[in-house]
Image: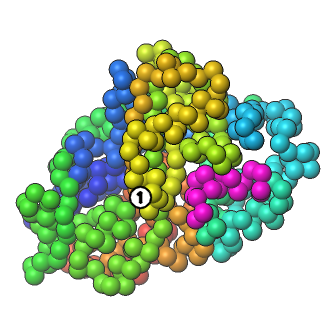
Amino acid sequence: MPASWAVVGGGFLGMSLALRLAQQNKRVTLFEGAAKLGGLAAGWQLGDITWDRFYHVILSTDSHLRALLREMDMDGELQWNCTRTGFYIDSQLHSMSSTLEFLRFPPLNLYEKVRLAATIVRASRSYDEKSLDQIPVDEWLEQWSGKSVTEKIWRPLLRAKLGEEYRRASAAFITNTIARMYGARSSGAKTELFGYMPGGYERIIRRFQQLLKRHGVDIRLGCPIQSVTRQPSGKLRIELSDGQAECFSKVVLTTPTCVAAEMCADLTRVEKENLTGISYQGIICASLLLKEPLSPFYITNITDKLVPFTAVIEMSALVDRKEFGGKSLVYLPKYLSPKSPYFLLTDHEIREDFLTSLALMYPRFRRDDLLCIQLSRVKHLLPIPTINYSAKIPKMLTSIPGLHLVNSTQIVDGTLNINETVRLAESAAKVLGRQKSASNPTRLQLEHEFATAHS
């Protein structure tokens, strides 16, 4: 009987990995603790509409995701729009959506604008990932942008995304972020061109689920995993939270590293220390359904420390408002440490904090404009690429034969987004699929193949 595979985690990473393994004629079971697939890309009900729980966009350069959409006959349905960008600095809202607006941008003088532009161009070009991995992000930004631009623009944006952990982050974080956003600029107008799927990711996930079933993937929803243990027979025993258990030849965990360490008691002490040593950033994200838009900007970057959320994402500046019944959909993300006391606040307290600041930013906003507001919390969202991060990346193969780890910590030359997630899954599936039960390659061989496939 052929080896049986279990993939733990039904987000885009787990779904993509399960699909590619099944296409290699593997017997694959996909476990997801939630009631439906999708993970961070899943949708939810917001008032009388259904849309994504977190904000997502698709770039024309997202080749891995778009190839997957073509498999589902969906790539041709993507809608593309040029968007505008705002900045909220010193309690003032400014537009930075064109070259002319950039030149007029009041918070910076001409020399500072030249330094900022040079930084963006430098980051958008090819570079040596390993060397940037050794340079503190603050040091790199000051070298290219100067102290004043770093203080006015970059440092507040870094704090917004990473909190005080930005001090430990490497330059690779900002260069990868800039390079992806620069890729959204169309070659003609030099404006940001973003895409979306009508119906949101919820439609994509439903079609993806159908594709998985056509390839024979056994999908188990509402099945949180309690533990994975090695059996005397060599099989791996997956125990569910309800006490049920099942054995598999191979198991791939797509969970955050700290969850994997807790789930697998048989890992070595060193492995567990390495897995729990990865720093993550969490998020609290408010979704607001409004009667009218707040501004013409898709994204408004916030450098004001007094604002509790770290950006304003106006989805209806990108997506046709018909998708929202003529209403406006706004996301207010707050990135924060998993240990932040802000996670302990009630939904009511967070809503009041967010809405009070929103009214200060947009004087025309009234509470009567708010039709619905919901909060989503994730404690382990974004692995923080600290100095020398490439040496700390968890290995795909563990000390337990047949147990593998594939998760977002292994995205080293890109940012956390769905395209990179699909790319990671496909690289891992190519390597894992070449394993033979009778003659396993060494860990070193497989790790080298994985690094080559993902480069």
- The residue at the point 19 percent across, 69 percent down is 228
Badge 1 element: strand
Q: Which residue is mark 1?
A: 380
Way the structure is coloured = rainbow
- Is residue 74 in view from this perspective? no
Identity of the amino acid at label 1? His
On the image, the x and y values in percent for residue 108 come to: 85, 45
User: For this rendering, which residue is in front, 1 or 12?
Assistant: 12
| Magenta extent | 150-165
Magenta stretch: dominant SS?
helix
User: On the rendered structure, is 293 left or right of 454?
Assistant: right
On the image, the x and y values in percent for residue 175 come to: 67, 58
**Which of the 4 image quadrants contains residue 361?**
top right
| Whether residue 46 is situated above or below residue 325 in the rendered picture | below
User: For this rendering, which residue is in front, 22 or 301?
Assistant: 301
Q: Is-magenta flag for residue 124?
A: no
